[in-house]
Image (cartoon, rainbow, N blue to C red):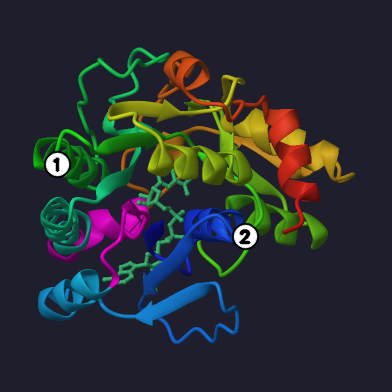
């Protein structure tokens, strides 16, 4: 079975690809020049905005499943570059949904808890999105495209993803936090932003399971701990032996230059627990898994 993963060099894709090895013939696409000498992983350097080259590659690979992680995933960058964010997060999704349908491949989109406005919390799959920043607007739009392209497709809404990069790079807030803690830098985290963080290893497993099973529709991939970002960072500091006093409590509205974030986008993970063999974990279990994970 062939698996195509977009965003090869990204944070989430690294976990997916590392754990797919030996179980899938893995193909990955990204923008960067990435040397790979693993005979089981095929890397294709390509700008996904290039429709023609993407179409040719897609037809050549003929994937059975596609995990679409590539995106402009930085909320503030999206807010300040809306045209590009629309092209990447909506335009590319549209092309991949069309090609997946054409090839009979199942497509799994990585969407976000941020599609909700954060006024309620404990969101279920059938709650209605109401984005409050441009990034979330592009993702809500992408969700509709993927769901209407084929009834095989899956929209995964990811909660805050926590962990160390398994391969490649990408935006790991855990890695950034550790670097700052090592230097003794005090770091502000918003206590009003409530999340249900999922570790990147569990997430990779769940995405692979969804690529290979019969589930279709929307599913929330979230951990078992409902906790604010200040508390998350304190737990990380304590677990790693740093002083929790280096973590400072702040409020989103006091953090200048940031696009608006929703307050409480905690998600109900009951469907994931019922549907998947991959267990959803608490924050401390997820931290232990990601800190000790070896390929
Ligand atoms: N991380 C989280 O906490 C989180 C939470 C909720 C949802 N999500 C969603 O999950 C997905 C994966 O997130 P992530 O944290 O792994 O993001 P990431 O680390 O930023 O990875 C995204 C990858 O996509 C690549 N990419 C972007 N535009 C491309 C293009 N035109 N052609 C080819 N490759 C391109 C990026 O390359 P460059 O770096 O060179 O641009 C990057 O390697 C995203 O869709 C994100 O919206 C993430």
Sequence-wise, the earlier of marks 2 and 1 is: 1
| Residue of label 2 | 165
- State the residue in front, 203 or 233: 203
Quadrant in the picture for the C terminus: bottom right
Q: Which mark is residue 100?
A: none
Q: Which mark is residue 141?
A: 1
Mark-to-mark CA distance, 2 and 1: 28 Å
- Taking the magenta stretch, the answer to whether it contains residue 76 is yes
Residue lying at 73% horizontally and 61% vertically, measured from the top left: 179
Name the spot of residue 19 as percent of width and height, x first.
60, 54
> Is residue 262 magenta-colored?
no
Please tell me in which quadrant of the rendered image residue 188 appears: top right
Q: Nearer the viewer, residue 155 or 177?
A: 155
The N terminus sits in image quarter: bottom left
Tell me residue 228's x, y (percent): 57, 26
Point out the stretch of residues depicted in magenta: 61-85
Judged from the image, the secondary structure of the residue bearing numbered disc 1 is: helix
Q: Nearer the viewer, residue 150 or 90?
A: 150
Badge 2: how crowded within 10 Å, few (<14), some, or many (20+)? many
x then y, percent, for residue 187 = 66, 48
Rendered residue at 35%/38% (across/down): 112
240 on left or right of 101: right
């Amino acid at each position: 079975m062939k698996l195509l993963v977009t965003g090869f060099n990204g944070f989430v894709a690294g976990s997916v690809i590392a754990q797919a090895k030996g179980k899938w013939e893995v193909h990955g696409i990204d923008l960067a020049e990435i040397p790979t000498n693993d005979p089981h992983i095929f890397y294709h350097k390509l700008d996904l905005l290039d429709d023609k080259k993407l179409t040719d590659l897609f037809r050549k690979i003929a994937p059975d499943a596609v995990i679409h992680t590539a995106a402009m995933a930085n909320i503030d960058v999206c807010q300040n570059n809306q045209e590009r964010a629309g092209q990447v997060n909506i335009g590319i999704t549209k092309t991949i949904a069309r090609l997946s349908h054409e090839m009979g491949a199942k497509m799994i989109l990585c969407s976000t808890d941020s599609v909700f406005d954060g006024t309620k919390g404990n969101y279920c799959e059938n709650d209605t999105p109401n984005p409050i920043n441009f990034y979330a607007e592009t993702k809500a739009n992408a969700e509709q495209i993927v769901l209407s392209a084929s009834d095989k497709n899956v929209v995964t809404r990811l909660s805050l993803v926590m962990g160390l990069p398994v391969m490649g790079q990408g935006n790991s807030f855990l890695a950034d936090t550790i670097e700052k803690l090592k230097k003794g830098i005090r770091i502000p985290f918003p206590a009003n932003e409530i999340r249900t963080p999922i570790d990147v290893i569990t997430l990779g497993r769940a995405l692979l399971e969804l690529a290979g099973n019969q589930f279709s529709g929307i599913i929330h991939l979230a951990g078992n701990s409902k906790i604010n970002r200040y508390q998350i960072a304190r737990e990380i500091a304590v677990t790693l032996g740093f002083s929790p006093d280096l973590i400072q409590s702040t409020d989103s509205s006091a953090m200048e230059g940031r696009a608006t974030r929703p307050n409480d986008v905690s998600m109900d993970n009951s469907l994931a627990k019922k549907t998947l063999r991959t267990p959803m974990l608490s924050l401390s279990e997820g931290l232990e898994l990601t800190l000790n994970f070896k390929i």
